[in-house]
Amino acid sequence: MSTEASIQSRGEQKARKAILSLGLKPVNGVNRVTFTRGRGLVYAISNPEVYKSTNSDTHIVFGVMEMEDLAARAQQAAMEQQLAADAEKSAEGEDKTEEASAAAVADEDDGEEVDATGVEEKDIEMVVSQANVSRNKAIKALKNNDNDVVNAIMELTM
């Protein structure tokens, strides 16, 4: 067994003993086990102990489960991609800085609230993050493109 055997609770030790008495065989070479749930949630077990039933397709997994949020990970990846694109633009000699673009976005807003009826919030957030524009511009672009996220982003970035 692994070093985790010394920190097992009494209940876990009893459960392991009962499961092993059922004739389960250890599965070697498994580095990670994941369970996906709706809304981008993933439960992951790193370095698990996996056992398989000999007469069915049932697996028993022991280990410490951690929750991961794929939506947050995707948003972080999008931010990194945006930073890389900004760095590439500055390397090409464009003189527009992030402060100037933020000021331009603030000037274009005019402080008016645009009606977001019929537009999904996740689509608005996606366009804002990908096109680096204000919420109002994202809503207008989505409405101009029949709520098509890709075309709205293309309109705002071209």
Image (tube, rainbow, N blue to C red):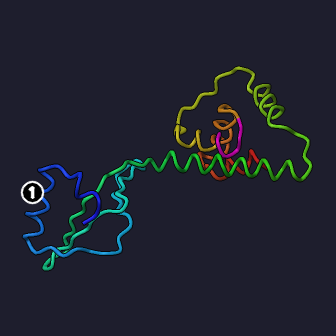
The location of residue 22, given as percent across then percent down, is 8, 71
Q: Amino acid at mark 1?
A: Lys
Please tell me in which quadrant of the rendered image residue 52 appears.
bottom left
What's the magenta region? Answer: 128-133
Q: Quadrant of the N terminus?
A: bottom left
| 80 within the magenta span | no
Question: Viewer-proximal residue, 72 or 114?
Answer: 72
Q: Secondary structure at mark 1?
A: helix
Where residue 11 appears, as percent x and y from the top left, is: 12, 50
Residue drawn at point x = 61 percent, y = 46 percent: 146
Q: Find residue 136 and report its horizontal and vertical position in percent.
A: 67, 31
Q: Nearer the viewer, residue 20 or 34?
A: 20
Q: Left or right: 32 with respect to 142? A: left
Q: Residue at x 12, y 69 (%)?
A: 20
Compared to residue 121, the image places residue 48 above or below, namely below
Of residue 141 and residue 102, the one placed in the foreground of this image is 102
The answer to whether residue 40 is above or below residue 125 is below
Residue found at the far bottom of this picture: 55
Residue indicated by mark 1 = 14
